[in-house]
Amino acid sequence: MDSTIKAKERKSRHWSTPRSLEAEQATFRLAAIVESAEDAIISKDLDGTITSWNRAAERILGYSAEEAVGRSILLIIPQELREEEKHILARLVEGQRIEHFQTIRLRKNGERLDVSLTISPIKDNEGQIVGAAKILRDITPQKKMEAALQTSERLASVGRMAATIAHEINNPLEAVTNFVYLARHHRDLPEKVREYLNRADQELGRVAHIAQQTLGFYRDSSRPAMLSIAEVVDDLLGIYERKFRYKDLKIERQIEPGLSVCALEGELKQVLSNLLTNAIQASHDGGRIIIRARGWRHLRSERRGARITIADNGAGIPKGHQHMIFAPFFTTKRELGTGLGLWITRELLEKTGGHIRFRSRDTAPTGTVMTIYIPDAPSTVTSERAA
Amino acid sequence: MIEHLQSHSATTPFLLDHKKSPLRFPSPAVPPRLPKSAGHPLCTFVIDDETGIADSLMEILNGNGYEAVAFYDGQSAIESARQRCPDLVLADVMMPRLNGVETVIAIRNICRRTRIVLFSGQAGTVDLLESARARGYEFELLAKPIHPDKLLKKLADFKKPS
């Protein structure tokens, strides 16, 4: 008993009397290391009150030491993860160390950070656990890179699959289309059979279009050609006619007469078809879709081109989704959507210097307006002007 | 489309009779054709390992004022081109053994004035075309399936005297 008291006294004397120069230097060195560390180093007591906050913590989490020290650690924990803190504290009390725990923490500006935490108990002179030291590493950039890698891997496999299926489907489709053509033009054909074949031909046109749209990734390597916007739009309206009728949609077509751009036909059709399909799917029965196209000169580059607007008075895009609609694999159509339509649309447009903008609201009056700008290929600008 | 067909049939009767347009391989005795001779049907090679496509296209072309011959592989088309240059070649890209791009490059080296169009159902073919481009050969590529009306319209442009 005595010896214990003496030992305690010795310890308390050691801490209460002025420290030796050596000990002070050691403390100073430690403090300097903590201050200059790349990772946030935070300490807290067992109530979860922050007791120290280094410079990296200020930088990573956005709060100054003055703002953070004395406040609860919950300050940086998202609402839905606050239970986590209880478990962490429970493990600390048992003297356990928590290593490389990946979770999410909040910056002062509300931004969410992916972090890796290592938490060790802090003991007092008597070995009692009095708090915890937390080393927090911001792993947001790594997480983003991992996500990008996963996405590109998924894309690559989708692409490989699409190419394989496309080849398997497009060849028989070509043969059947040709044979139906030959049958349709046969001399001694009963009128009724000719009518059936004409309908079969129309349906084949739809299959061909769908194959190209969904198996798509249609890399059109032929040279850009002068395309009449009215003709391209009418082709597409023909393909979707049945869908318009099915939903009783009213289509308004406002196309500047003679408007044409020099572009790749496959790509232009894919872009317009993606936007039109979205408009149809968003529309309520009896809804309205407006397709407007006019010549336009890009404000900054002064490049000539066409500006095409596809507007619907359908459901609209919820605010929470609006920042994600151009991301690959984002879809709200569940099994019906690939989540690639708008992503491909934007890729195709931006590749040639075009762009896509949109406005949408999901509260009355609802609807979405997608506007694209398709630049004219520079080489044809002169010839078209002359025409 | 329909007008186009009608204008064609006005000058060339619409023939689908097999006897009148058989699968003919140009014989060595025939002297080389002068390309794009006005008024004459264009001698066209259709090359596709899918026999259904090669045969049907040949028939469609023969019924629309062309003189088409079907080949199921690149090598036999090249051999025929050595005997007689076609005015036009329509070749599939992905074919076993000799692919379409290599085939048309060989034909191009034999027949400088032949018009060449490739068609394919696969996006992967773009890479083959790129490598051909790097070697200095440029070919037009059509995507399969292409509707015969559209194909005929496209080919009709080649018939116009340049």
Image: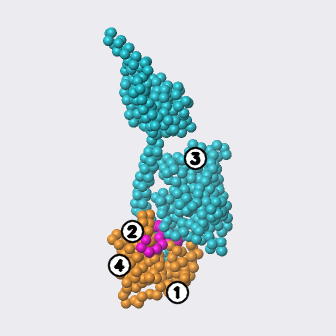
Tags 3 and 1 both on a single chain: no
Rendered location of residue B150, percent (x, y): 52, 71
Label 1 environment density (alpha carbons within 10 Å; few <14, some 14–19, many ≥20): few
Q: Amino acid at mark 3?
A: Gln
Rendered location of residue A116, percent (x, y): 43, 37
Q: Tell me the orange chain.
A: B
* Badge 4 vs badge 2, beta-carbon distance below 8 Å: no
Q: Amino acid at mark 1?
A: Ala
For residue B38, the mark is: 1
Residue occupied by mark 3 = A322
For residue B76, the mark is: 4
**Left or right of B102 in this view: A184:** right
Q: Tell me the cyan chain.
A: A
Residue occupied by mark 2 = B94
Secondary structure, mark 4, is helix
Tags 3 and 4 both on a single chain: no
Of the residues under marks 2 and 1, which one precedes in the sequence? 1
Which subunit holds the residue at mark 4?
Answer: B
Q: CA distance from mark 4 to mark 1?
A: 27 Å
Rendered location of residue B65, percent (x, y): 50, 81
The residue at the far front in this view is: A21
* Vertical relation: B100 (above or below) A245: below
* Badge 4 vs badge 1, beta-carbon distance below 8 Å: no
Q: Magenta segment: does it hold B149?
A: yes
Label 3 environment density (alpha carbons within 10 Å; few <14, some 14–19, many ≥20): some
Closer mark to the observer between disc 3 and disc 1: 3
Q: Amino acid at mark 4?
A: Ser
Which picture quadrant has residue A259? bottom right
Which picture quadrant has residue B32? bottom left
Which subunit holds the residue at mark 1?
Answer: B
Which subunit holds the residue at mark 2?
Answer: B
